[in-house]
């Protein structure tokens, strides 16, 4: 008998004997009280269904619909249960996961893959007596932690191109750069002279006055390309082809050791100049000299670390990576791999979990396992090209001589001195046969 029944019984006078358990009236009131109790329980469940921790079934589906998240499919095609769908919804709510923190992003991606959202909590659940963690479990936790990596400030290779036409006063090109970065880096410069040699070269970053200049009668030959790199005196390098010409350069002040300026965050102006063409007492009449300063082309590239951009690195073969981690751990039954989880689905997870004003990109890595004797779920692409050759050289000279004397009425005489040289190189590869005068296999 519930308290609802007691409340109903108290409404009747004692003359009705509603409190007697065997009476018909008491049975009716008890049934009515049970229905009221079920109604109260339904209302409580309805109120609790607004919370992810308590919602079940359709209520959980409704919360997922509000956030555009649906149940994933298991390999047999059936929808996932509440126990895995609930962590996925939690990872969707920024107020629950703490916004766009690194750990929140990792947890959201792991939850999308069917893995534990919080590895620390998962480790506590698997801890043995006294809070100790078995070695197999510790190795699994470590592997799951390394499965999803977040790299802040995504790198991007930037390239700027410029070209200068030859003039009497000198050839100059100016590159205007304006890129945000969190770590200024020196560029790599390719300075090409397609026609005419380059002399009196200078590279100046205008806002700081830093840069490098060439010394003396140094010249980049026509058709050659000068490569410059290194942001310090110790790492500075200048080369033409395989020839190192670093000693032919000095800093812009004419005294200090050369070093390339760094590309800053924000605007900067880079001026490239070649101030002389043919030079008296230096130029040669039989070379491709020009009277004007030679035209040139410049290619400036550098690695830029982008602010407010991060990369999430996950294995390209996610299923194989998870199966490899679970193999031999004895915990494979605690994880569920989902059907049809495409690679772009992880990017959609990132787009919904990132913090405001921050852009996240998913990068996929192919990590081949280390060599071992155990069977691996990876294709082995080891390439072995054996080559074996046997070379036999034979030199034969034939100096056949033939003399013929004919006596007749005409008194004619014929003399032949035929000579032939024969040189044969024979190589045997899988028992090759040479039939000609000269052959190589």
Image (cartoon, helix red, strand yellow):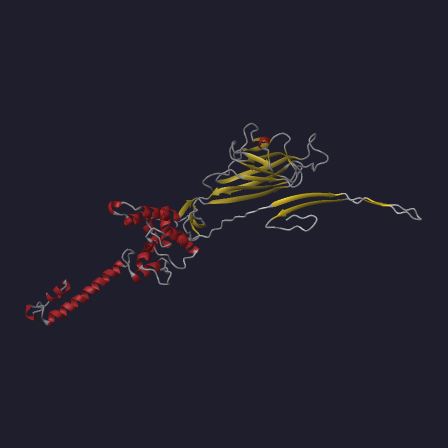
* Count of numbered labels shown in the rendering: 0
Residue under the point 30% across and 49% down: 122
Residue under the point 40% across and 47% down: 149
Q: Quadrant of residue 243?
A: top right
Q: Is residue 240 left or right of residue 395?
A: left
Q: Is residue 14 visible?
A: yes
Q: Quadrant of residue 284?
A: top right
Residue under the point 26% across and 58% down: 48
Q: Which quadrant of the figure contains the N terminus?
A: bottom left
Which residue is farthest right?
409
**Image: 234 above or below 404:** above
Q: Is residue 101 visible?
A: no
**Image: 75 above or below 196:** below
Which residue is farthest top?
255
Which residue is farthest left?
15
Which residue is farthest bottom?
24
Q: Is residue 430 left or right of residue 419?
A: left
Coordinates of residue 395 in the picture (x, y in percent): 69, 43
């Amino acid at each position: 008998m519930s308290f609802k029944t007691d409340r109903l019984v108290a409404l009747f006078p004692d003359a009705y004997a509603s409190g007697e358990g065997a009476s018909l009236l008491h049975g009716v009131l008890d049934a009515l009280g049970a229905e009221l109790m079920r109604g109260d329980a339904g209302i409580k469940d309805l109120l609790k269904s607004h919370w992810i921790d308590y919602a079940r079934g359709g209520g959980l589906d409704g919360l997922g619909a509000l956030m555009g998240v649906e149940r994933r499919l298991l390999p047999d095609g059936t929808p996932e249960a509440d126990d895995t769908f609930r962590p996925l919804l939690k990872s969707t709510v920024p107020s629950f996961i703490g916004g766009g923190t690194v750990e929140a992003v990792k947890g959201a991606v792991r939850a999308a893959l069917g893995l534990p959202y919080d590895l620390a909590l998962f480790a506590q659940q698997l801890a043995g007596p006294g809070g100790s963690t078995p070695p197999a479990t510790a190795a699994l936790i470590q592997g799951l932690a390394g499965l999803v990596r977040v790299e802040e400030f995504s790198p991007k290779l930037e390239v700027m191109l410029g070209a200068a036409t030859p003039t009497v006063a000198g050839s100059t090109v100016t590159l205007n750069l304006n890129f945000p970065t969190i770590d200024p880096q020196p560029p790599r410069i390719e300075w090409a002279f397609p026609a005419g040699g380059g002399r009196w070269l200078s590279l100046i970053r205008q806002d700081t006055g830093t840069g490098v200049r060439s010394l003396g009668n140094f010249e980049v030959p026509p058709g050659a390309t000068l490569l410059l790199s290194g942001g310090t005196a110790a790492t500075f390098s200048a080369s033409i082809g395989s020839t190192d010409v670093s000693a032919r350069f000095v800093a812009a002040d004419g005294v200090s050791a050369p070093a390339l300026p760094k590309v800053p965050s924000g605007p900067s102006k880079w001026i490239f100049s070649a101030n002389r063409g043919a030079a008296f007492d230096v130029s040669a009449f039989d070379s491709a000299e020009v009277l004007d300063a030679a035209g040139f082309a410049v290619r400036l590239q550098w690695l830029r670390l982008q602010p407010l951009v991060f990369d999430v690195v996950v294995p390209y073969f996610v299923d194989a990576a998870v199966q490899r981690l679970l193999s031999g751990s004895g915990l494979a039954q605690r994880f569920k791999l989902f059907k049809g989880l495409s690679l772009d689905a992880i990017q959609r997870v990132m787009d919904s979990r990132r913090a405001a004003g921050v852009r996240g990109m998913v990068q996929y890595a192919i990590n081949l396992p280390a060599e071992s004797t155990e069977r691996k779920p990876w294709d082995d692409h080891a390439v072995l090209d054996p080559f074996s050759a046997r070379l036999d050289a034979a030199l034969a000279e034939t100096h056949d001589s033939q003399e013929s004397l004919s006596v007749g009425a005409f008194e004619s005489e014929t003399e032949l001195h035929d000579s032939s040289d024969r040189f044969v190189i024979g190589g045997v590869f899988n028992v090759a046969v040479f039939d000609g005068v000269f052959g190589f296999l």
